[in-house]
Image (cartoon, grey):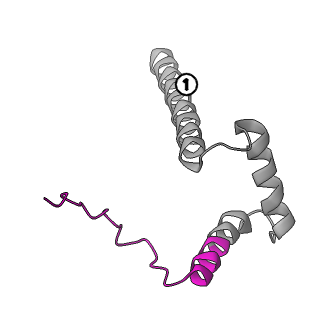
Amino acid sequence: MTPNLIQPTISPFAPVYQSDLTKTIGVLQQLQVLCAGQYDASLADVIQVVRDMQHDFGEDSRLENVIQALVGQHLGQQIVTRRLAHQLHHVEVMEV
């Protein structure tokens, strides 16, 4: 009996990489786009970001765990921002 294998869902927006070289190019391009708004990023900048994450999360942390932790932080920030906006709106309505 063969196991029922499920193919992972691939986003239609996700780039398709044909080789390790094109995968590396894609990763570097994504990093460049993420950093481009602030300055012309260098490999040293990327290395520093990775070192900071290693310091914060541990050298052997799995990427998925780091991503989930960062997503959780982001959601927490959004909740705080929305609560503050709601409180500000409530105060403005009461003053009118």
**Where's residue 82, x and y in %?**
49, 30
Work out whether 13 lies above or below 58: below
**Where's residue 15, x and y in %?**
46, 76
Q: Which residue is mark 1?
A: 84
Q: Secondary structure at mark 1?
A: helix
Predominant secondary structure, magenta span? loop
Q: Quadrant of the N terminus?
A: bottom left
How many numbered marks are there? 1
**Where's residue 7, x and y in %?**
27, 64
The residue sitting at 57% across, 37% down in the picture is: 69
Classify residue 47 as left or right of residue 60: right
Residue 20 lies in magenta, yes or no?
yes
Work out whether 36 lies above or below 91: below
Q: Which residues are magenta?
A: 1-29
Front-most of residues 5 and 52 = 5
The residue sitting at 81% across, 49% down in the picture is: 51
Work out whether 47 lies above or below 18: above
Classify residue 70 as left or right of residue 54: left
The residue sitting at 56% across, 46% down in the picture is: 67
Amino acid type at image mark 1: Leu
Residue 40 lies in magenta, yes or no?
no
Q: Quadrant of residue 47?
A: bottom right
Q: Quadrant of residue 8?
A: bottom left
The residue sitting at 81% across, 72% down in the picture is: 40
Q: Residue furthest right?
A: 44
Q: Residue furthest top?
A: 94
Q: Quadrant of residue 33?
A: bottom right
Front-most of residues 23 and 83 = 23
Q: Residue furthest front?
A: 1
Label 1: how many Cα within 10 Å (few below 14, some 14–19, many 20+):
few
